[in-house]
Image (cartoon, rainbow, N blue to C red):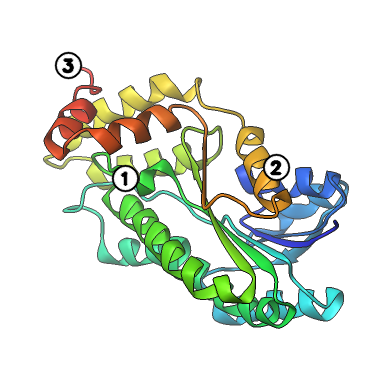
Amino acid sequence: MKKVILITGASSGMGKVFAQDLAKEGHIVYGAARRVDLLKELTSKGVKTIALDVTNDESMKSCVQTILDQEGRIDILVNNAGYGSYGTVEDVSMEEAKRQFDVNVFGLARMTQLVLPSMRKQKSGKIINISSIGGKIATPFGAWYHASKFAVEGMSDSLRTEVKPFGIDVVVIEPGGVKSEWATIAYENLTKTTQNTAYSDMATKFKKAFETTISKNAEPEVISRLVSKAIAAPKPKTRYVGGYMAKPVLFFRRWLGDRTMDKLLLSQLPK
């Protein structure tokens, strides 16, 4: 059945692929992003594009209302907008830490608030939150990013029980390594915040360790298939996992103690 789908952060990476694939399946797809110029390519793929800044309340309200005015409903919200701000807890400014939460958590929460009234009215809908395996484990230098994704995990669990009586499903997608702009942005932030600090040497080793894995990351289509599966399922799973090393990492996190997990993570840094 054709659904009206709103995807945030659709200008690049996974969000862009989600929009293209879901439009190809015949759904009415709105790809939303702050960088509107980067959305132009999606129009040729049958995707409707719309401006959206998830740190601006008026922009978020306008986006949702425009779609409701044009389509009469929003069946699926894919909260995909997000980025990784890497650096040490000591060195990352509180301004940047707050921005990480504004985009990854509060923007997601506000978009959810805005679509829920219409979903409750129609007694159906799905909120799909793009989290990360980084919402279950934490690596060095990723404290604010991990904190934001841990928050998404907890919020999703609470939300799921709140909206279940209204016929609304809440699904969490937990990608592992996926090819996108994410790593570039995260590493740029890490370099900027740790230059000439007590953590410089460790940060350099951390970047080298992750650079060796980038080529092994999964294509975004791997996660796109999980989103499609969640949308098509009458009773979707509460969580879907995919991408490079996602399942092994979550297995280790489940069964290893904190100290052992710390040693495992630190052992990946080159000597």
Q: Secondary structure at mark 1?
A: helix
118 lies above or below 202:
below
Q: Residue at x 70, y 45 (%)?
A: 228
- On the image, which quarter does residue 267 sit in? top left
Q: Secondary structure at mark 3?
A: loop
Q: Secondary structure at mark 2?
A: helix
Amino acid type, label 2: Val
123 lies above or below 32:
below
Front tag of 2 and 1: 2
Q: Nearer the viewer, residue 181 or 149?
A: 149
Residue 192, label in figure: 1
Whole-percent x and y of residue 146? 33, 50
Q: Nearer the viewer, residue 80 or 232?
A: 232
The answer to which of marks 3 and 2 sits earlier in the sequence is 2
- On the image, which quarter does residue 257 sit in? top left
Residue under pointer 2: 17
Q: What is the spatial separation of the Cα atoms under label 1 and label 3, in whole angstroms?
A: 23 Å
Q: Crowding near pointer 3: few (<14 within 10 Å), some, many (20+)? A: few
Whole-percent x and y of residue 169? 60, 63
Residue 20 visible within the image: yes
Front tag of 3 and 2: 2
Q: Residue at x 79, y 52 (%)?
A: 40
| In this picture, residue 263 sits left or right of residue 97 | left
Amino acid type, label 1: Lys
Residue under pointer 3: 271
Residue 59 visible within the image: no
On the rendered image, what quadrant is the N terminus found in? Answer: bottom right
Whole-percent x and y of residue 174? 48, 44
259 lies above or below 213:
below
Q: Crowding near pointer 2: few (<14 within 10 Å), some, many (20+)? A: many
- Badge 1 vs badge 3, beta-carbon distance below 8 Å: no
The answer to which of marks 1 and 3 sits earlier in the sequence is 1
